[in-house]
């Protein structure tokens, strides 16, 4: 099982380098909405704290996809088959982490594939790839 995890001991400084790495790697874009992870503001904290939110590879998207366009690979990572995806958005709606996204250019779903590019760019070591 391979997945991108958040290092709870590290402090996110909201530099957004993880989002930039993700969007640039897969879309060659600086549009942070094209990243397959997000940064949450931790409520009721002073000073204001932020934390990355990643895909937990739970499979809820795959179980709810009416086209069966999302399958789990041999590493335990759920992948979207762009040829089968119709862009209905069901997977986006059911994602508990709110990190399943729709590509505005193609209207196809996309998600984290645990490549680790974001973790490599994080200066605070907030992200890492876990392999079991």
Image (tube, rainbow, N blue to C red):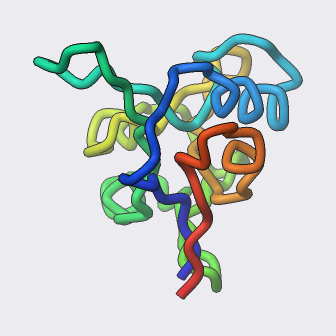
Q: Return the residue found at the far front.
A: 47
x and y percentages locating residue 114 in the rendered image: 64, 59
Q: Nearer the viewer, residue 22 or 124?
A: 124
Q: Return the residue found at the far left.
A: 44
- The number of numbered discs placed on residues in the rendered structure image is 0
x and y percentages locating residue 64 in the rendered image: 31, 55
> Relative to residue 43, is residue 9 depicted above or below?
below
Q: Nearer the viewer, residue 89 or 118?
A: 118
Q: Is residue 1 left or right of residue 118?
A: left
Q: Nearer the viewer, residue 29 or 67?
A: 29
The residue sitting at 71% across, 55% down in the picture is: 116
Q: Nearer the viewer, residue 105 or 37?
A: 37
> Relative to residue 62, is residue 19 depicted above or below?
above
Q: Is residue 123 left or right of residue 2?
A: right
The residue sitting at 60% across, 49% down in the picture is: 125
x and y percentages locating residue 79 in the rendered image: 61, 60
Q: Return the residue found at the far right.
A: 28
Residue 78: which quarter of the image?
bottom right
Residue 50: which quarter of the image?
top left
Q: Is residue 132 left or right of residue 99?
A: right
> Relative to residue 86, is residue 112 depicted above or below?
below
The residue sitting at 31% across, 58% down in the picture is: 60
x and y percentages locating residue 62 in the rendered image: 41, 61
The residue sitting at 61% across, 23% down in the picture is: 107
């Amino acid at each position: 099982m391979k997945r991108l995890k958040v290092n709870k001991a590290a402090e996110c400084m909201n530099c957004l380098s993880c989002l930039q790495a993700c969007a640039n790697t897969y879309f060659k874009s600086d549009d942070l909405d094209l990243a397959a992870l997000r940064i949450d503001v931790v409520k009721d904290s002073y000073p204001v704290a932020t934390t990355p939110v990643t895909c937990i590879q739970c499979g809820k998207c795959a179980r709810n996809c009416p086209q069966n366009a999302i399958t789990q690979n041999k590493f335990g990572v759920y992948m979207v088959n762009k040829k089968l995806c119709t862009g209905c958005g069901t997977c986006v709606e059911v994602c508990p982490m709110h990190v399943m996204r729709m590509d505005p250019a193609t209207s196809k779903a996309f998600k984290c594939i645990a490549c680790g590019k974001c973790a490599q760019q994080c200066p605070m070591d907030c992200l890492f790839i876990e392999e079991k």
